[in-house]
Image (cartoon, rainbow, N blue to C red):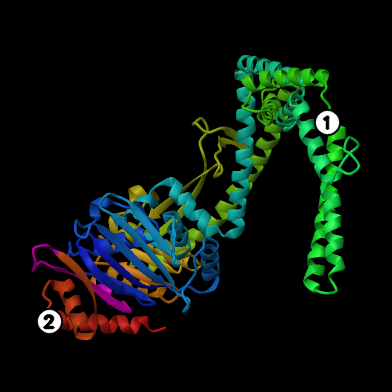
């Protein structure tokens, strides 16, 4: 869960800390006090888009810091990912996160003691927190979001089927697009292929070898300077070991080293230090002998061959002709040839290849249609369960006669998507299948079944979304759930029921609720109030925890706008007592 949240320099909030608890945390306050900034801060902390316009001019940057304490599978996944990125949890197991945004719009993130990309905060956020606001209600009206909600509910086996369809669909469309491109651009492909073949033929005739240009350059230098190299090598060999041209009494390095060694060995008995030096002279004599042998080999191999030199000149000229056209060096020319051969295969427009691609496209189309049919059946089965469970939750949210239906319909053909026969019906197919999913609401018996966007009021839509979230919570999901005024447009008994459902969610999740409703706030395990301070030159807001009498006064303010009213406080205390009784397991 999120144990603590600190926000500085964001909107009306100058510097405040929210001590959060497990269970249900409620955030209340007057309109404009800064409750929205708390949700905005949460969004920033978990990788949301930064808005420089919300940063306070002084100090010129907004910072949001949080402390997470995770457990179970989520902790294993998140900690492993952060360790891979170079960070890690604190010694007490908690995880520190921070996000800074400047007035210029620059953004920095830190996670687990290390600077991280902002996207890493987003990765953690996907595992840890789900934020639901009024904008989420609007998203729930979109068919794609309704289909995604049903897929999420259907379970891991269904999700594997969705992934398999997406993978097969991607391969199918790739083959279809490749086939269409080869057919429609055959002339351009032939022209490009002809140019590539000309280049490959020229390179093949020369047959360059890796590193050949450097080797030929070095060999040419040796042949061009053969006489100078021979003179230097002969003189060195003469100095080291003598030679056939030297007089018998000409001293050489080998003989001199031998004389020195024997002289020192003769005195080694008198002073062992000379014996040690004699041993080192013996090592030097061995090294000189090795050099002498290598010089002999070098001289034997040195050849001033004009014919060979001319051959090298001609070979280097042929290689330079290639490097002028295709690359900077011979290795680059060889790489160009490899790429050209690969590209030639891509440019193939032969009838044999086109027939093969056509057969593969048909095979993949059949695979996609078969998977889409299975996916449709799985969605229809999940739709029945999903509708039943959401309907049950709506009954507990003061909508006892309402019913949710989930329609899974074939997607109409003739749109921009390709068309396939799925379960005997011609329909449009996309990477998510061949279905359109529509959530429908029957508000009361005898009412028509209408899509949510036409049949649900704002308050009903809030309760439908909360019912869906309660259903999702039963199958896992992020451990922290945030609700930003999802109870808008709701009051009376419905508000009490929303409070009950949020309290039920809080038994298995950490729940953060921003609300204007005292009926919801009464169910909180921890109540935080955002208060505005207009005493100075600049308006600021802060957050404090309220308990006991203070909490009753805050609920009285929310009930009647009169925090000091005895009657309002009495009503608030009664509401708190009812909520406390309801929260008991």
From where the camera sits, is residue 492 visible?
no
Residue 534 is one of the magenta-drawn residues? yes
Q: Is residue 185 left or right of residue 23?
A: right
Label 1 neighbour load within 10 Å: few <14, some 14-19, many 20+: some
From where the camera sits, is residue 115 visible?
yes
Residue 335 picture location, percent across and down: 68, 31
Magenta extent: 519-539
Q: Compared to 24, does 293 lie above or below?
A: above
Labelled disc at residue 302: 1
Q: Compared to 419, does 152 lie above or below?
A: below
Label 2 neighbour load within 10 Å: few <14, some 14-19, many 20+: few
Residue 538 is one of the magenta-drawn residues? yes
Q: Residue at x 77, y 71 (%)?
A: 273
| Quarter the C terminus occupies | bottom left
Q: Is residue 2 left or right of residue 489?
A: right
* First in residue order: circle 1 vs circle 2: 1
Labelled disc at residue 366: none
Q: Are marks 1 and 2 in contact (CB under 8 Å)?
A: no
Residue 301 picture location, percent across and down: 86, 33
Labelled disc at residue 567: 2
Residue 310 picture location, percent across and down: 78, 17
Residue 233 picture location, percent across and down: 79, 36
Q: Residue at x 84, y 46 (%)?
A: 251
Q: Residue 140 or 186: which is nearer the viewer? A: 186
| Quarter the N terminus occupies | bottom left
Q: Compared to 163, does 308 lie above or below?
A: above
Q: Nearer the viewer, mark 1 or mark 2?
A: 1
The image quarter containing residue 29 is bottom left
Q: Is residue 55 left or right of residue 479?
A: left
Dot 2 falls on a residue whose secondary structure is helix
Q: Residue 351 or 469: which is nearer the viewer? A: 351
């Amino acid at each position: 869960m999120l144990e603590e949240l600190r926000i500085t320099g964001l909107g009306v909030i100058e510097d405040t800390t929210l001590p959060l608890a497990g269970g249900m945390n409620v955030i209340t306050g007057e309109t404009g006090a800064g409750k929205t900034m708390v949700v905005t801060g949460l969004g920033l902390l978990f990788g949301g888009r930064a808005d420089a316009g919300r940063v306070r001019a002084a100090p010129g940057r907004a910072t949001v810091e949080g402390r997470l304490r995770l457990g179970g599978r989520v902790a294993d996944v998140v900690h492993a990912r952060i360790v891979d990125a170079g960070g890690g949890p604190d010694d007490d197991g908690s995880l520190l996160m921070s996000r800074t945004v400047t007035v210029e719009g620059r953004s920095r993130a830190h996670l687990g003691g290390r600077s991280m990309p902002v996207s890493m905060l987003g990765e953690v956020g996907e595992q840890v927190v789900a934020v639901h606001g009024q904008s989420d209600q609007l998203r729930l009206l979109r068919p794609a979001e309704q289909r995604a909600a049903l897929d999420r509910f259907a379970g891991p086996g269904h999700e594997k089927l969705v992934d398999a369809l997406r993978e097969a669909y991607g391969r199918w469309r790739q083959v279809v697009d490749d086939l269409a491109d080869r057919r429609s651009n055959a002339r351009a492909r032939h022209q490009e292929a002809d140019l590539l073949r000309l280049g490959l033929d020229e390179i093949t005739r020369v047959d360059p070898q890796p590193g050949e240009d450097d080797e030929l350059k070095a060999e040419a230098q040796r042949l061009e300077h053969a006489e100078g190299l021979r003179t230097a090598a002969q003189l060195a060999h003469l100095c080291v070991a003598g030679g056939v041209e030297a007089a018998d009494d000409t001293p050489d390095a080998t003989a001199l080293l031998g004389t020195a060694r024997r002289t020192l060995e003769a005195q080694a008995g008198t002073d062992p230090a000379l014996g040690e030096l004699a041993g080192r002279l013996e090592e030097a004599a061995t090294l000189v002998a090795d050099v002498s042998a290598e010089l002999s080999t070098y001289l034997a191999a040195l050849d001033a061959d004009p014919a060979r030199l001319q051959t090298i000149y001609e070979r280097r000229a042929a290689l330079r002709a290639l490097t002028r056209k295709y690359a900077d060096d011979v290795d680059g020319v060889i790489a160009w040839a490899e790429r050209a051969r690969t590209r030639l295969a891509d440019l193939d427009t032969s009838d044999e290849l086109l027939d093969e691609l056509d057969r593969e496209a048909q095979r993949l189309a059949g695979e996609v249609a078969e998977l889409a049919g299975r996916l449709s059946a799985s969605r229809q089965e999940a739709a029945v369960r999903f509708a039943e469970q959401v309907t049950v939750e709506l009954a507990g949210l003061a909508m006892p006669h309402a019913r949710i239906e989930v329609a899974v319909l074939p997607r109409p053909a003739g749109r921009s998507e390709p068309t396939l026969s799925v379960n005997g019906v011609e329909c449009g197919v996309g990477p998510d299948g061949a279905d359109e999913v529509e959530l429908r609401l029957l508000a009361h018996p005898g009412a028509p079944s209408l899509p949510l966007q036409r049949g649900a009021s704002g308050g009903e839509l809030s309760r439908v979304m909360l019912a869906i979230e309660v259903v999702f919570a039963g199958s896992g999901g992020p451990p922290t759930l945030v609700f930003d005024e999802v109870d808008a447009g709701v009051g009376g008994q419905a508000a009490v029921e929303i409070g009950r459902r949020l309290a039920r969610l809080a038994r298995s999740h950490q729940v953060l609720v921003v609300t204007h409703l005292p009926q919801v706030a009464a169910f909180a395990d921890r109540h935080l109030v955002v208060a505005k301070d207009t005493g100075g030159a600049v308006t600021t807001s802060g957050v404090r925890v309220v308990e006991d009498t203070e909490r009753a006064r805050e609920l009285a303010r929310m009930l009647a706008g009169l925090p000091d009213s005895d009657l309002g406080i009495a009503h608030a205390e009664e509401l708190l007592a009812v909520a406390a009784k309801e929260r008991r397991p």
